[in-house]
Image (spheres, helix red, strand yellow):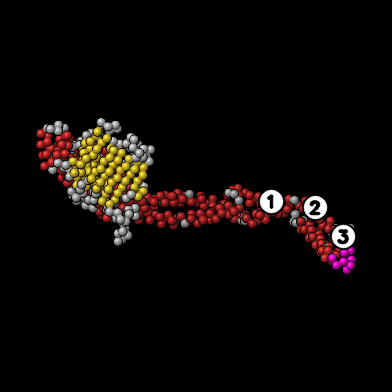
Amino acid sequence: MLYELRVENLLLMERAELRLAPGLNVLTGETGAGKTLLAHALDLLLGGKARSGIVRDGAAEAYVEGVFALPPELAPGQPDGGGDDRIPADAQELVLARRVWPDGRTRAYVCGRAATVADLRELGSRLLSFYGQHEHRKLMLTAAQLDVLDAFCGGEQAARRVAMSEAHDRVRALEAELAELEGLVGARERELDLIAYELREIEAIAPSVEEELELTAERDRLRHQAALRHAACAGADAVLPEDGEGAAARLASAASELESVAGIDPALAPLAERLAALRYEAEDVAVELRSYLDRLDGEPGRLEVVEERLAAFARLSRKHGGGIAEVIAHADACRARRDALQDADVTFESLSAELAAAREARAEVGAELSAARRAAAPRLAEAVLERLGELAMGDARFEVALRDRDGGYGPRGQDAVEFLIAPNPGLPFGPLREVASGGELSRVMLALLSAAHGGVLAGAAEWPQTAGRGRGEGRRRSGGAETAAAAIGGDGDGSLLVFDEIDAGIGGHTARAVGAHLRELAAGRQILCITHLPQVAAMGNRHFTIVKDGSRSPAVTTVAALEGDGVVGELVRMLGADEDDRAARGHARELLRAA
């Protein structure tokens, strides 16, 4: 229930405060007075987009606030740990608010705390269902008609719908996987041959990163053999030549001279030892250089062998990407792919059996869905006809036709639904979207709503959100009523229904019947109806009027609650009579007494 609605600086509305009553609340006013501003204010509380230029000229910001009864399931501190952590523990009411600045920025609040627009959308959708001036036209959509029928089937149908969606998704996933595997099996032999060829080529060479490094170093030595030989020979000859005296002999002579006088001055003894050590080290280097020269000769043709091996490594690297490490990784991937391809037959058979079982499971759920729909369709048609008779469409005929869905199964089963109507005697049945006028569509929708409120659509209050959508997204004004519960208004007796001139295109005795049905629909719940019909307005438990004052610039609209003679005067205005027209005032009072 909505206790209070406050609006500030929203276009013509400088300030308005509505205290709504239980039951039917009506809002009336001259055309252009700004009745739809209140509808837009409620839309802002539902997380709707703020229109450009919505802030009143000269105002710093616009502000909308709604004070709602706190639903028990959202109240924090429940024994089972439930509740909503966005709501303070001491909250007694749920307050949703929205600020809008002239530059288009907005900010949302939940119980005085900053929140996101998504929070408003989710929480507001639990409290409020909005039906705009053309909302009844959603009944032209076969998807919405199917939702209505499924909701009429009761709560168990909701579980079947969920099971069908899951079963259909499972079948689609298996079909896609099997189709991919079929393509794999078709090209398997060709791919296996290619893998075998590439593996043979790599395994025949058997490359390794370590060998590549060693071969590269060896190739560099072999390519520069002459320079290496010359340097090693020069070093060996300089230290220990085969003929003549070299550095080693001279070091030996110098060491001998120092040793001969070391007894005279002990300080020379360490130096003599160092010279002797240098001599022995020089001789060792010379010996190793001679040995290096002997090894440097190597085997004839070794360079060609190394070059050929490295060339084979290079070919593999170019073919399989980057270097030898990548070649080895490619070989590992080929072996894994070969194993997978060799097991493809077993996997294909397993997937085929799994798909057959999934299709069978989907067919079972689909059969249950269809059976429930076939059983419910005539009962829904009968309920709608009964209500249409009370809405001045007693000669109308209404049917709910079921047929197989084009394309077979879908997430909602294999059925397609079409609401058929013959508004007048002698006319054949035709689709609701093609035959019904705007006023007739409004009354069909009200018939569905009245039937739902009367308990005919049992279980509609538990109807789940449409698969793939967040909670409540289907009930915003911008999104329409995309779930079956929202489509028929069966969200439970606690939510507020808002009708924005849903009675457009209706008049006379029909308007009176529509008002009576709205009054009946409001029993035990709360409705806010923006209307231009006195017959509907007279049914209200509380009456608000909106008046525009054009003497100010910019113009200002004010909202006031009416009582007693104020209600009579507004009904007289709506009847198109002068305020002092005694006959019109009598008619207005008669409308109120009849309510």
Sequence-wise first label, 1 or 3: 3
Q: Residue at x 27, y 35 (%)?
A: 556
Q: Residue at x 24, y 34 (%)?
A: 548
Inspect this view and state whether residue 169 appears.
yes
Depth check: give the residue in front, 267 or 220. Answer: 267
Q: How far, Cα to Cα, is label 1 from label 2?
A: 23 Å
Where does the magenta region start and end? 256-267
Depth check: give the residue in front, 101 or 444. Answer: 101
Which residue matches tag 3?
Answer: 250
Circle 1: is it few (<14), some (14-19), or many (20+) Cα within 10 Å? some
In terms of secondary structure, where does tag 1 sit? helix
Circle 2: is it few (<14), some (14-19), or many (20+) Cα within 10 Å? few
Sequence-wise first label, 1 or 2: 2
Left or right: residue 106 versus residue 433 is right
Which residue matches tag 2?
Answer: 230
In terms of secondary structure, where does tag 3 sit? helix
Q: Position of residue 401 (x, y in %)?
A: 23, 44
Left or right: residue 64 versus residue 531 is right
Q: Position of residue 395 (x, y in %)?
A: 14, 39
Q: Residue at x 14, y 33 (%)?
A: 579
Q: Position of residue 560 (x, y in %)?
A: 21, 40
Depth check: give the residue in front, 287 or 328. Answer: 287
Which mark, residue 307?
1
Depth check: give the residue in front, 355 or 396. Answer: 396
Q: Residue at x 64, y 51 (%)?
A: 312
**Amino acid type, mark 3:** Arg
**Amino acid type, mark 2:** His
Q: Nearer the viewer, mark 1 or mark 3?
A: 3
